[in-house]
Image: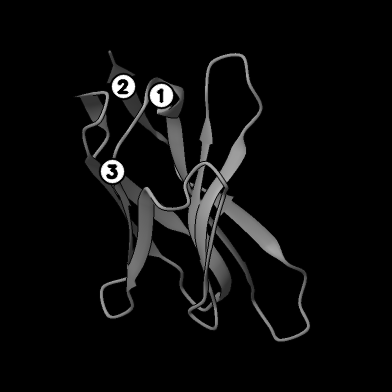
Amino acid sequence: VLFVESGGGSVQAGGSLPLSCTFSKGALMIEAIGWFRQAPGQAREFVAAINSDSTTQYSDSAKGRFAISRDYAKNIVYLQMNNLNLEDTAVYYCHLSGRMTMRGVLEEFWGQGTQVTVSA
């Protein structure tokens, strides 16, 4: 699985940033694709995901501010981040989980990460 992440950068508090992740999955059957983030000195945490049935999940922090979407034809997953605050500063990672076969082991894959910095 290969990822190309883009869209990170710097923004003032209250602003918006879009992230995108283009992925190539080969024959992998996707269970979920989405985003995690890791702030300095903190553990990596879940942000949002789209499941194989197209349902979405959000962390409490992301609910109401972030929107995840997927272009199935182009294999791109997007994260629109609105009303950003200082606590959203982190490296954001594209994450994909899937199986090579119906009963195969669940595998996880990570993008290289893109920095998001929110300033006052």
Q: Residues within 10 Å of mark 3 (few under 14, many from 20)?
A: some
Ranked by sequence position, the earlier of labels 3 and 1 is 3
Residue annotated with mark 3: 82
Whether residue 4 is situated above or below residue 37 in the rendered picture? below
* Closer-to-camera residue (10/103): 10
Residue 92 on image: x %, y %: 43, 37
Look at discs 2 and 3 and give the one toward the viewer: 3
* Closer-to-camera residue (5/86): 86
Ranked by sequence position, the earlier of labels 2 and 3 is 3
Residue 2 on image: x %, y %: 42, 55
Report the residue at 68% width, 61% height from top: 107
Q: In which quarter of the image is residue 101?
A: bottom right
Look at discs 3 and 1 and give the one toward the viewer: 3
Q: Quadrant of residue 57?
A: bottom right
- Whether residue 10 sits left or right of residue 117 in the image: it is left
Residue annotated with mark 2: 118
Please state which amino acid type lies under the numbered disc 1: Thr
- Whether residue 32 sits left or right of residue 74 in the image: it is right
* Closer-to-camera residue (20/58): 58
Residue 8 on image: x %, y %: 27, 34
Which element type, helix, strand or loop, lies under badge 3?
loop
Residue annotated with mark 1: 89
Please state which amino acid type lies under the numbered disc 2: Val
